[in-house]
Image: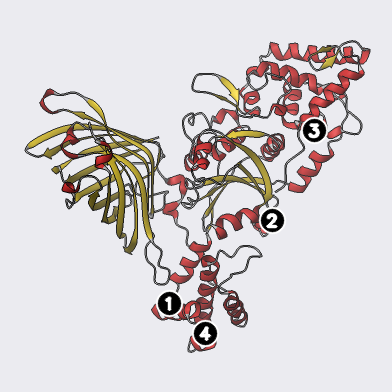
């Protein structure tokens, strides 16, 4: 990975050298007891006075260039944690001081052997902005050639910028919500084409983990203990990482910005390239920081304003796409898995049977397997077999498959003599376009009646979930195979017998359900894992006793048209408010159905049954816990949904009601 530039610490050293050569007395960044220094000081003071007259420090553009945000308490500060990013000691929290110090820095003399350390070279965007707004004549500024900056701009030759979304990756906690980064378009081909797209550059902001410990990693990420840094690399490396190694689809959203705005954005990237920013998994993450960088193009967009509490990559992408005219239609780059799935879809049952022989039979005679097929048929089967091996063994760059290395080579040789072009991979899953999905954070209210023993209990529930998606909700913009919920809380207001007591009813710190369907060749496992706290026993109406549990399971899913059926075996470990005597382990299963009624309507049915074994209270063993829920959901747009639901458990003999959800 290439770094953008050297550390601006040398700017501080430059000011120090000037100070020492001129006797040690200082005002701002200047020594004050030499004719040259006095002349520089007088020039800077005049422009600072002009800056005050027009209140330049309060400009949204100045604020944006320093990556300033307003915290929840109303305090303004920059997200950048490297002191070298600022000229003033309090530049992180004082826009006025930083403007003064930046004006001073413009008039510092150039050190002959280190011209690239001058403010005009190290911070070209903010320097040019100050010069333009104060109308400082160029002849008053030091003459400097910025070789490193010029080399960077020339190497990149940026013609455009795209915001790229990498789809959800459940196998990595840092990427399960998706990821965004920038692609720098380095040129245009004939007809605005991109024949060398993979040779473009990518700009990524990410955490630098200092531990591999599975427990410490999320804790340190949630508390800002990792340093986040920018990196610059060839775009093909990100394609290999996401498309091939992790089988994640890429969605590229070209920014509809002018040539000058492209250049300004490149200068901003040059300035922030070497800095460190404390990485917070919930808010100041990869996507939020990129929003602040994009905001420098047009500070009036206020892209980051809505993300004071939490920022998910998909939501930040939606904020960018929601800006009128800011993005062009996205381009889809399928993953290794998506490529294989399309290849397999071209095959009939006979083709799939031949494909299985090519990738599973040992030994295999390729000519015998393909006998009787025309060239088109041979090409389709061989292409599918190669793509299957590439996906199955994570073939990336120079990496070759380990289990089927020779088989892949033989398939490539066989393909080389079948002179038929491969069928195009051009099916675009528009329903999974990430900008089309509902917002991540949800608040909801539901009203229902629950039959508990002989009593009808009327209740109103209030729920809050910061992220991400429930499979019972129509899946536009999300995978139809993945449910991911975090920090979901439900509060219940009991309305029976004049009671009015709002209590915490249930909590779901984390829950994931992955149900990829069984294919004709590929047979992926479905699985689930979750942490929860739910009411137990007759206390359900009051919510005064909760069972805290951790559980999971594996199984399989199948798809019939728009309907998905899944079945999983489950295990669970739980304890409730009664202490160690309630400790129990349970086994059982889950059955489910999901079906689209229309583009924006969905029906879901899920049933769970578990048989607990109590370690310290054998008298309670043998009682099955059963629950089922039927829900019909209508998504009105990406912010509003309504649902009808019915459910039962051991304690609730029947119940149902109406719910409303608001996403933001």
Q: CA distance from mark 2 to mark 1?
A: 35 Å
Residue located beneath label 1 in the image: 352
Q: CA distance from mark 3 to mark 2?
A: 27 Å
Q: CA distance from mark 4 to mark 3?
A: 63 Å
Q: Is residue 86 left or right of residue 394?
A: right
Location of residue 298 with respect to 406 vertically, above or below: above
Say which residue appears at 54% left-offset and 29% top-offset. Answer: 302
The answer to whether the residues at label 2 and label 1 have Cβ atoms under 8 Å apart is no
Which color scheme does this rendered protein use? secondary structure
Say which residue appears at 48% left-offset and 70% top-offset. Answer: 343
Residue located beneath label 4 in the image: 363
Please tell me whether mark 4 or mark 3 is closer to you in this view. 4
Q: Nearer the viewer, residue 583 or 544?
A: 583
Disc 2 or 1, which lies upstream in sequence? Answer: 2
Residue 438, quarter of the rendered image: top left
Q: CA distance from mark 3 to mark 1?
A: 60 Å
Please tell me whether mark 2 or mark 1 is closer to you in this view. 1
Disc 1 or 4, which lies upstream in sequence? Answer: 1
Picture coordinates of residue 198, whole percent (x, y)? 65, 57
Q: Nearer the viewer, residue 229 or 210?
A: 210
The answer to whether the residues at label 1 and label 4 have Cβ atoms under 8 Å apart is no
Q: CA distance from mark 2 to mark 4?
A: 39 Å
Q: Is residue 424 visible?
A: yes
Residue located beneath label 2 in the image: 199
Q: Nearer the viewer, residue 543 or 579?
A: 579
Disc 3 or 2, which lies upstream in sequence? Answer: 3
């Amino acid at each position: 990975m290439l770094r953008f530039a050297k550390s601006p610490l040398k700017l501080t050293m430059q000011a120090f050298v000037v100070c020492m050569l001129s006797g040690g007395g200082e005002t701002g960044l200047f020594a004050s007891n030499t004719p040259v220094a006095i002349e520089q000081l007088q020039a800077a003071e005049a422009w600072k006075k002009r800056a005050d007259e027009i209140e330049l420090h309060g400009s949204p553009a100045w604020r944006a260039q320093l990556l300033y945000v307003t915290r929840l308490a109303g305090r303004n500060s920059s997200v950048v944690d490297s002191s070298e990013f600022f000229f003033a000691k309090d530049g992180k929290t004082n826009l006025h001081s930083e403007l003064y110090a930046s004006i001073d820095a413009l008039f510092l003399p150039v050190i002959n052997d280190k011209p690239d350390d001058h403010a005009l070279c190290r911070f070209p965007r903010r320097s040019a902005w100050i010069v333009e707004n104060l109308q400082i004549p160029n002849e008053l500024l030091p003459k400097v050639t910025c070789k490193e900056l010029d080399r960077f701009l020339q190497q990149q030759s940026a013609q455009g910028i795209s915001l790229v979304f990498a789809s959800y990756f459940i196998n990595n906690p840092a990427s399960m919500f998706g990821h965004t980064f920038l692609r720098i378009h380095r040129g245009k081909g004939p007809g605005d084409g991109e024949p060398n797209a993979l040779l473009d550059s990518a700009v990524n902001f990410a955490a630098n983990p200092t531990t591999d410990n599975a427990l410490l990693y999320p804790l340190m990420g949630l508390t800002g203990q990792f340093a986040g840094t920018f990196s610059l690399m060839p775009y093909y490396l990100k394609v290999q990482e996401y498309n091939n190694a992790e089988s994640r689809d890429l969605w590229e959203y070209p920014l509809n910005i002018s040539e000058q705005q492209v250049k300004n954005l490149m200068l901003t990237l040059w300035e922030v390239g070497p800095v460190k920013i404390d990485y917070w998994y919930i808010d100041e993450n990869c996507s939020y920081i990129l929003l602040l960088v994009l905001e420098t193009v047009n500070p009036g967009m206020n892209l980051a304003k809505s993300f004071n509490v939490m920022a998910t990559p998909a939501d930040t992408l939606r904020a960018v796409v929601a800006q009128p005219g800011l993005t062009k239609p996205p381009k889809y780059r399928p993953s290794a898995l998506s490529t294989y799935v399309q290849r397999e879809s071209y095959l009939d049952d006979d083709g799939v049977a031949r494909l299985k022989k090519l990738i599973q039979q040992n030994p295999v005679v390729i000519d015998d397997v393909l006998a009787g097929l025309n060239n088109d048929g041979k090409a389709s089967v061989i292409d599918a077999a190669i793509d299957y091996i590439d996906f199955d063994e994570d073939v990336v760059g120079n990496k070759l498959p380990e289990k089927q290395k020779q088989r892949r080579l033989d398939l490539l040789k066989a393909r080389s003599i079948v002179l038929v072009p491969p069928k195009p991979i051009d099916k675009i899953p528009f329903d999974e376009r990430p900008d089309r999905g509902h917002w991540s954070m949800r608040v909801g209210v539901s009203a229902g009646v629950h039959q508990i023993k002989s009593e009808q209990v009327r209740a109103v529930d209030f729920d809050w979930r910061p992220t991400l998606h429930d499979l019972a909700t129509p899946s536009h913009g999300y995978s139809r195979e993945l449910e991911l919920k975090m920090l979901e809380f439900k509060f219940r207001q009991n309305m029976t017998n004049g009671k009015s007591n709002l209590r915490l009813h249930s909590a779901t710190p984390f829950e994931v359900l992955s149900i990829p369907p069984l294919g004709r060749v590929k047979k992926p496992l479905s699985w689930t894992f979750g942490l929860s706290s739910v009411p137990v026993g007759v206390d359900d109406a009051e919510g005064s006793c909760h069972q805290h549990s951790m559980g999971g399971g594996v199984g399989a899913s199948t798809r019939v048209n728009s309907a998905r059926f899944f079945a999983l075996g489950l295990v669970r470990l739980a304890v409730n408010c009664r202490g160690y005597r309630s400790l129990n382990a349970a086994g059982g299963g889950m059955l489910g159905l999901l079906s689209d009624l229309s583009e924006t309507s969905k029906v879901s049915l899920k049933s769970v049954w578990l048989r607990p074994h109590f370690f310290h209270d054998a008298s309670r063993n043998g009682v099955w816990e059963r629950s089922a829920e039927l829900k019909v959901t209508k998504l009105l747009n990406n912010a509003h949904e309504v649902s009808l639901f019915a459910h039962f458990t051991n304690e609730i003999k029947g119940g149902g009601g109406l719910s409303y959800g608001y996403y933001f």
